[in-house]
Image (cartoon, rainbow, N blue to C red):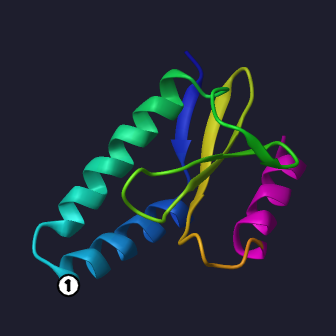
C-alpha cells in the first residue's frame, strides 16, 4: 500500500474548520472530523476513484460539509494537500498542487 501523507497545511485547514463548526453547534465539529476521517480512509483505500480536477490533483467531496479534500497520488505515495471550503479560490490549493508536481 502506498504511503499516505496529510500535509501540515491540510491538517491546519481541517483543524480550523473543526473549530468553526464546533462554535456553530457543540458536536458539529466532531461530525465534521468523522466525515473527514471517513473520506481520508476512502482516499487511502482507493486513491484513483476520485476525479482529476487540475493537472494530477484529484478532488474528494464530503457528503455533508463543503470542504473537499485535494490530493496527489503516485504508485508509491498519496499526499493530501488541501481541505478548503468549496467557495475558496482554487488558486489557494492549485499553488500547492504545482509544488507537489515540481517535487515529484
Label 1 element class: helix
The image shows residue 50, relative to residue 14, as above or below, that is above
Q: Hey, which quadrant is residue 82 in on the image? A: bottom right
Residue positioned most to the front = 64
Left or right: where 23 falls relative to 93: left
The image shows residue 29, relative to residue 49, as above or below, that is below
Left or right: where 75 falls relative to 66: right
Q: Which residue is mark 1?
A: 23
Q: Residue at x 27, y 76 (%)?
A: 21
Q: Residue at x 26, y 49 (%)?
A: 34
Left or right: where 102 falls relative to 39: right
Q: Is residue 59 or residue 44 the one in the foreground?
A: 59
Residue 6 in the image: state x and y as whole percent: 51, 48
Q: Quadrant of the N terminus?
A: top right
Q: Residue at x 86, y 48 (%)?
A: 101
Residue 104 in the image: state x and y as whole percent: 84, 40
Instruction: Tell me which segment is drawn in magenta.
Output: 91-104
Does residue 100 show up magenta in the picture? Answer: yes
The image shows residue 28, relative to residue 35, as above or below, that is below
Residue 15 in the image: state x and y as whole percent: 35, 69
Left or right: where 92 falls relative to 43: right
Q: Hey, which quadrant is residue 99 in on the image? A: bottom right
Q: How many marks?
A: 1
Residue positioned most to the left = 26
Residue 46 in the image: state x and y as whole percent: 56, 23
Q: How many C-alpha atoms fall within 10 Å of the one at disc 1: few (<14), some, or many (≥20)?
A: few
Q: Identify the main secondary structure in magenta.
A: helix
Does residue 94 show up magenta in the picture? Answer: yes
Q: Residue at x 78, y 51 (%)?
A: 100
Q: Is residue 76 or residue 68 the one in the foreground?
A: 68
Q: Is residue 1 or residue 51 the one in the foreground?
A: 51
Amino acid at each position: 500500500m502506498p504511503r499516505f501523507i496529510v500535509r501540515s497545511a491540510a491538517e491546519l485547514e481541517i483543524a480550523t474548520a473543526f473549530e468553526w463548526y464546533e462554535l456553530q453547534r457543540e458536536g458539529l465539529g466532531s461530525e465534521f472530523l468523522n466525515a473527514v476521517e471517513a473520506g481520508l480512509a476512502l482516499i487511502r483505500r482507493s486513491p484513483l476513484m476520485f476525479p482529476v480536477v487540475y493537472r494530477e490533483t484529484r478532488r474528494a467531496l464530503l457528503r455533508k460539509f463543503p470542504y473537499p479534500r485535494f490530493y496527489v497520488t503516485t504508485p508509491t505515495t498519496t499526499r493530501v494537500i488541501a481541505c478548503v471550503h468549496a467557495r475558496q479560490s482554487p488558486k489557494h490549493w492549485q499553488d500547492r498542487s504545482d509544488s507537489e508536481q515540481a517535487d515529484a
